[in-house]
Image: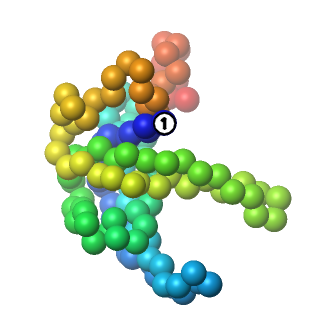
Amino acid sequence: MDLKIAGKVVDILDVQSGESKNGPWKKRDFILETPGKYPRKVCVTQWGEQIDQTSLEAGEEITAFIDIQSREYNGRWYTDVKAWKIEKGAQSEDARPSPDENVIDLGPGGDDDGLPF
């Protein structure tokens, strides 16, 4: 499955790091704002080497290739949006999904009731 989300980087949070039983780790979250009539802000996480391989700046247009993963902890569910690849620049024809690809559409549900949800 090939999930992508495109938009403008509006904030880049500090790198977090630590030590686990598998060794050292680091992650960085950034906030991506999607285009459209009702823009959405999505917190996307980069892990490990991806942080060093891709330098991000606020205001940049990017396409993030993502995995979505949920986990349960103490009866509550938490969902992460993890970027495994980032392409910089406005969304090109090559970055646009083909009709047979799975794409997250964060826009209104298709009904035109004027509500953003």
Residue in front for this viewpoint, 67 or 43: 67
Q: Is residue 65 above or below residue 99?
A: below
* Residue 50 falls left or right of residue 26: left
Quadrant where the C terminus sits is top right
**Which residue occupies 48% across, 24% down?**
108
Residue pushed farthest top? 112
- Residue 33 visible in the shown view: no
Secondary element at tag 1 = loop
Q: Amino acid at mark 1?
A: Met
Percent across and percent down for residue 85 are 33, 53
Number of marks present in the image shown: 1
Percent across and percent down for residue 112 are 48, 13
Would you call the spot at circle 1 few (<14 residues within 10 Å), some (14-19), or many (20 or more)? few
**Which residue occupies 54% across, 48% down?**
68
Percent across and percent down for residue 116 are 50, 28
The residue that disc 1 covers is 1
Q: Is residue 114 above or below residue 97?
A: above
**Which residue occupies 69% across, 57% down?**
71
Residue pushed farthest right? 75
Instruction: State the scheme by which the image is colored.
Output: rainbow
* Residue 79 falls left or right of residue 59: right
Residue in front for this viewpoint, 34 or 91: 91
**Which residue occupies 48% across, 79% down?**
25
Q: Is residue 22 above or below residue 90?
A: below
Percent across and percent down for residue 7 are 30, 42
Residue in front for this viewpoint, 50 or 41: 50
- Residue 93 visible in the shown view: yes
